[in-house]
Amino acid sequence: MTLERLSSNKSFGGWNQQYSHASEVLNCTMRFAIFLPPQAEERKVPVVYWLSGLTCTDENFMHKAGAQRVAAELGVAIVAPDTSPRGEAVPDDPEGSYDFGLGAGFYVNATQAPWKTHYQMYDYVVHELPQLIEREFPVTDQRAISGHSMGGHGALVVGLRNPERYSSISAFAPISNPINCPWGQKALGRYLGDDESTWREYDASELLKAKGCALPLLVDQGDADNFLQEQLKPEALEIAAEGAGAPLTMRMQPGYDHSYFFIASFIEDHLRFHAQLFD
Amino acid sequence: MTLERLSSNKSFGGWNQQYSHASEVLNCTMRFAIFLPPQAEERKVPVVYWLSGLTCTDENFMHKAGAQRVAAELGVAIVAPDTSPRGEAVPDDPEGSYDFGLGAGFYVNATQAPWKTHYQMYDYVVHELPQLIEREFPVTDQRAISGHSMGGHGALVVGLRNPERYSSISAFAPISNPINCPWGQKALGRYLGDDESTWREYDASELLKAKGCALPLLVDQGDADNFLQEQLKPEALEIAAEGAGAPLTMRMQPGYDHSYFFIASFIEDHLRFHAQLFD
């Protein structure tokens, strides 16, 4: 795997960069963004992985969340992958919808044709990308994971299934119970097929119910979020956490919606939450 | 003039909003963005006007600069107009260039056909927009002005020509001496005609030389900015300020480029600079 640097911008004394590389698990060229704080010039730093929501690329979070300021203060790197495999060879939803196919990989390993050849975002995020990051950049193997909406779902699922690989998990407005909402049912049904029992491995509420969680979990949810009732269902996550005795802090934020204005308002809390749990 | 609200997002306890209105001086419908800090629910707050650069709209700064956090702390509103008149009736550069016409109004009052019918951004920014803002929103008549690149030029020119209307001026990578750079010569020549003596009213370095300035001025400039030598020429502004005894603080920022990563890194300093000079 060779990395090609696509951009490099100084930001809060550190560097905001984009790279492309050939992904073996996704069978395509992928782009990711990384913020390296100033401390990374002198020592290895831990990494917060950020998983974005539907329609996003590696750029949205780095441009809109205002996370670099606090990451530079805390000495934490941020890595933001793209939200699906990309490129001309990668099939997209023939209907061209925004919530399936390109920009909507849902962080699963697809088992159904034609998706399974490229849509292996779970393995990419859990294994291939961290391996690349830890080989090529001045980072430790301490990791936290966070994300928004579809990416909040991804962060919860990835963290809950791999607690040994992360020190903490957080999410903004995650799709908390995808097997019971339209976004999740559409994506999981097409990527994984009709056997709904296979969907549970990608449902944060089901995972929490089945496996519990010892890692600290922080979730922020705006109460003016248009998707709250139909798609996000934070109450399912809360009930599962309570049943499992998991250390979930769920904060309902009055007046906030689903946008990056919401994420920007609370990203500082999430980064401080993750940083205090790194060694 | 009636205002139509196009969007409203809660942000750091305040509100980030977009409005459209019929502009009399521009002869078209215009959109602007406003951030109202939480303090505006209880009292009138001062306003920092932000003028954006080439190709931008009212959105870029509000999405990418991360300014709302500090504005919410300081109790300062931010107003970001668009960078040119807009709409089907508004002529654009027939060559479709990015540096003239739509998205490139240069904050001048055009005197040449066909531009003069709509391209009156100077009057819009100095008079019409603040009048509207001060009538429709909970703001005082205390104003500061800032901007980036073409908008840094605009902020300097607007502030230097109207010192009684602003308490401070700042800029990021401004086009400091447009009569002597390609961007400025192209735009001023087309909007104002061949008589270069009319260009000087829109050249910050010439204005500073001719009129001086008693207002505090803060300018940040990245030394890795691709446009530094050919287009921006901060040294002309420094020489003019020194000659005029103007209170200019010019900061060269090592390693920073022309992007919003640069703006985001230093916007906090600019907002604090403006806020301390409000009553």
Image: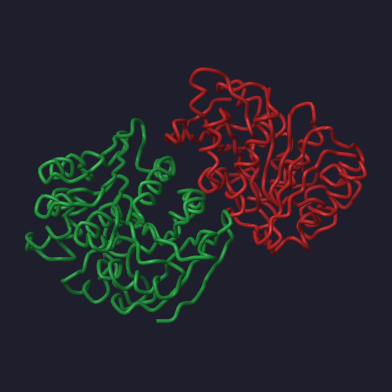
Chain colours: A red, B green
Q: Is residue B214 above or below residue A26?
A: below
Q: Residue at x 17, y 64 (%)?
A: B190
Q: Quadrant of residue A7?
A: top left
Q: Residue at x 59, y 35 (%)?
A: A79
Check the picture and name the quadrant holding the N terminus of chain B: bottom left
Q: Is residue A182 above or below residue B229?
A: below
Check the picture and name the quadrant holding the C terminus of chain B: bottom left
The outermost residue toward the bottom is: B1
Number of numbered discs visible in the structure rendering: 0
- The x, y position of residue A92, in whole percent, is 66, 53
Q: Residue at x 68, y 52 (%)?
A: A101
- The x, y position of residue B80, in whole percent, is 40, 61
Q: Nearer the viewer, residue B230 or B83?
A: B83
Left or right relative to B162: residue B37: right
The outermost residue toward the front is: B279
Q: Nearer the viewer, residue B138 or A247?
A: B138
